[in-house]
Image: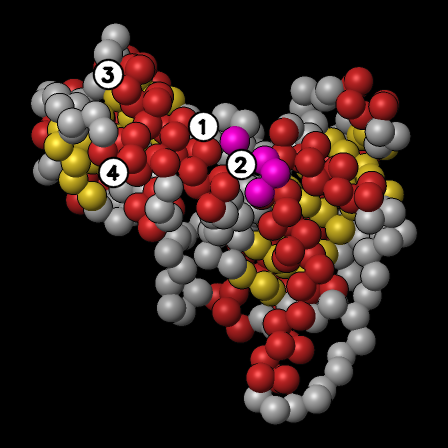
Amino acid sequence: MKILLTSTSFQDTPGKHHYLLNSKGFEIDMIRGPVKADVLLPIIHQYDGVICGDDEYSAEVLNAGKNGKLRVLSKYGIGLDKIDLKAAKDLGILVTNCIGVNHTTVAEHVFALLLSYCKQIPYAVQHTRNGEWLRKTGIEIRGKTIGIIGLGKIGKEVALRSLAFGMHVHAFDARPDYDFIQSHGIVFHTSPDEMIPLCDILSLHLNLDESTRHIIDAKRFFYMKEEVIIVNTARGELIDQSALIERLEANTKMAYLTDVLDQEPMPIHHPLYKFNQVFITPHIGSRTFESVERQGIMAVENLINNLSI
């Protein structure tokens, strides 16, 4: 069988997932993703299965794959918004993902971003590296109110860490786990609009679909506190970028800390480059040795199990 591997996290991080994949006797081609549809279209028919990242699997690409050998898309990671799931189902192409393996790592990255900004770590490191001794005054997160939009596995881990830091935790979720909410003293809101005006920090943890795309729009920016800090480790398209840029230009006190963008890799002239209160990491929230190995093994097992059906 012939397999295409496009996940750069899988490729770049050695571990047991490499051994497992290589032990199965597949013929393996590698491309560094995320791969655009126009690259996939002429080649996808060659492959029985794919271990993919955030590649563009449109209906056209899936049709081309089905006309060849394609049977399985094994997503390395969780989000499936780049795959036309309806087309895959109609064509009988199995799609799997890696549920429940990266929530600890992503939650830690939320606080890596948050503490880096609040303590001005990048600024301090860069200036001391330059031989300077410039000291900015930071802010504490203890006592701050954090609003978590999306209280799934990652959102829950963020909530637990927020409580450990002495923060007041508020949350919204369309399908709330009331046992978790009540047992941890979380203030639950039935709408983001109730919660947003109360929050010093907002952390986004939603899957991307048409109901969540641009869930943070101009209207919701208007009701936020002037010095709000928004942390996004989910999907760039959860935020209306035009509204975000307008808010950043009007208010230098707010901050946007993100691991995800609506276009990845980040274009060299991306409009968010110019804002000092914007911190951007290159989609590395789940990229730790431990998490990559867990996700990689699950992605390979998903591939093997479904190719054998």
In the rendered image, which residue does mark 4 sit on? 5
Q: Which of the two labelled residues, at mark 2 and mark 4, occupies the earlier sequence position?
A: 4
Q: Is residue 280 left or right of residue 308?
A: right
Q: Amino acid at mark 2?
A: Asn
Placement of the N terminus among the 4 image quadrants? top left
Q: Amino acid at mark 3?
A: Leu
Asked whether residue 200 is in view, the answer is: yes
Whether residue 102 is in magenta: the answer is yes
* Label 3, label 4: how far apart the Cα atoms are: 15 Å
Please give the label number shown on residue 45.
Answer: none
In the rendered image, which residue does mark 3 sit on? 307
At x 25%, y 27%, the residue is: 59
Residue 136 sits above or below residue 301 on the image: below
In the rendered image, which residue does mark 1 sit on? 98
* Label 3, label 1: how far apart the Cα atoms are: 16 Å
At x 30%, y 30%, the residue is: 20
Residue 152 sits above or below residue 158 on the image: above
Whether residue 301 is in magenta: the answer is no
Residue 277 sits above or below residue 30 on the image: below
Circles 2, 4 touching at the beta carbon (< 8 Å): no
What is the secondary structure assignment of the residue under circle 4?
strand
What is the secondary structure assignment of the residue under circle 2?
loop
Image coordinates of residue 129 in percent, x first then y, are 58, 84
* Residue range of the region highlighted in magenta in the rendering: 101-105
